[in-house]
Image (spheres, rainbow, N blue to C red):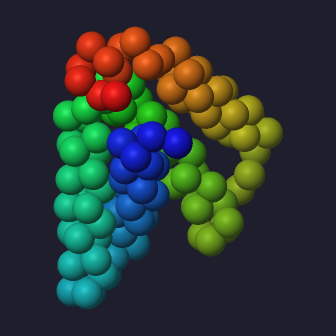
Amino acid sequence: MNYEWLKVFIAAFFEVFWVIGLKHADHLWAWLGTALAICVSFYLMIMAGKRLPVGTVYAVFVGLGTAGTVFSEIVFFGEPLKLIKLLLIILLLAGVIGLKLVTGKKEADVQGVE
């Protein structure tokens, strides 16, 4: 996998933490952790966007972050799992994977990525 895409996946991982932190943080250390996760997440996304198509980077970042957040809410916070929610997350991930697949080497070469 391309190193720049790894940055996007790690950024999405941190996005899950800061989104959960925005909802559940209730003391200084939790808020500081949330702020740190925001900084790491956006820094990695911005760095990846310098070498990859920005629209695709953002779509993958948000899609993976959304899926991860919904999954975390279900697993760790007792959010009910509904079939329609699961199907929509699968559809979202299919769109993210599709965007990643159609963002081929030719587009990356135009932006200076080898």
Image quadrant occupied by the C terminus: top left
Count of all numbered marks drawn on residues in the image: 0
Residue 29, given in percent of the width and then of the height, sits at 25, 87
- Residue depicted at 75% across the width and 45% down the height: 82
Looking at the image, residue 16 lies above or below residue 84: below
Residue 92, given in percent of the width and then of the height, sits at 59, 30
Considering every residue shown, the one lying at the far right of the view is: 83
- Residue depicted at 71% across the width and 56% down the height: 80
Please indicate whether residue 1 sits to the left or right of residue 32 in the image: right
Residue 61, given in percent of the width and then of the height, sits at 40, 40
Residue in front for this viewpoint, 6 or 19:
6
Looking at the image, residue 34 lies above or below residue 101: below
Residue in front for this viewpoint, 98 or 109:
109
- Residue depicted at 28% across the width and 77% down the height: 33
- Is residue 41 something one can see in this rendering? yes
Please indicate whether residue 70 sits to the left or right of residue 48 in the image: right
Please indicate whether residue 20 sits to the left or right of residue 55 in the image: right
Looking at the image, residue 107 lies above or below residue 14: above
Looking at the image, residue 36 lies above or below residue 87: below
- Residue depicted at 22% across the width and 44% down the height: 47
Residue 68, given in percent of the width and then of the height, sits at 55, 53
- Is residue 55 something one can see in this rendering? no
Residue in front for this viewpoint, 47 or 70:
47
